[in-house]
Image (cartoon, grey):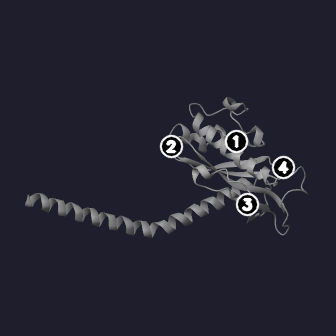
Amino acid sequence: MAEMLKVGLILMLVTLVAAMALGLVNSRTAPIIAIQKELAKQKAMTEVSASLSPGDSLAFDSLSIAGLENPYASSDNTLSIVRISVPPDTSRIGYVFIAFGKGYSSTVQTMVAVELEGVISNTMILYQQETPGLGANIVNPAKLISKLNGLTAPECLLTKDGGGIDAMTGCTITSRTVTNSIRNGLEAMSDAGLFCSDTEGGVQ
């Protein structure tokens, strides 16, 4: 009995020390990880937005839009829209946002650049942890997301869902996650009056 108590106390102490060490490491690395994620997001914003005005130095400004519907509540994220302009001119040339969708094994994040008329200009997978060799292939633009360029919200549908986009082979869930999440974001932006038929309309 005494031996069992001794072993139990040792295990408890080892567990306590390990938990404290893990907490210390996490407290040291969490800020670094957060900075790296923010830098990756900013880099992705610049890369996808280059399709709107290549060669120019772009400015990004977050928009606060009253009444903007959030289509990403189910994945515990919000729709955040950034206006893109070319300094010193402050008039917008387009928008960028992150689309969130629950895939097969992770929440897939897609950075999307949009023209003023609501046409997808460029896309990039920002984050995913889908099945290696299957859904994880979504990071290859040729597999799916490059096919979205030039489309509007109603066109952003898989063939299986009545649209014209072929899903990745064996990866319908991941493919649908990406297309639906982008379409949902575009529809919310359209409902908020952000898109226009010419460069004079919409939100400045």
Task: List the residue tagged with mark 3.
Answer: 82
Residue at 66% x, 45% y: name it. Answer: 181
Tag nearer the camera, 4 or 1: 4
Contact (Cβ within 8 Å) of mark 3 with mark 2: no
Contact (Cβ within 8 Å) of mark 2 with mark 4: no
Q: Is residue 193 above or below residue 144?
A: below
Label 2 residue SS: loop
Q: Which callout, 2 or 4, points at the residue further toward the start of the chain?
A: 2
Q: Identify the amino acid type marked 1.
A: Ser
3D distance between C-alphas at marks 3 and 1 = 21 Å
Figure quadrant of the C terminus = bottom right
**Residue 126 visible in rendering:** no
Task: List the residue tagged with mark 1.
Answer: 146
Task: List the residue tagged with mark 4.
Answer: 117
Give residue 105's mark.
2
Q: Which callout, 3 or 1, points at the residue further toward the start of the chain?
A: 3
Structural crowding at the residue carrying mark 3, measured as other residues with C-alpha within 10 Å and reported as few (<14), some (14–19) or many (≥20): some
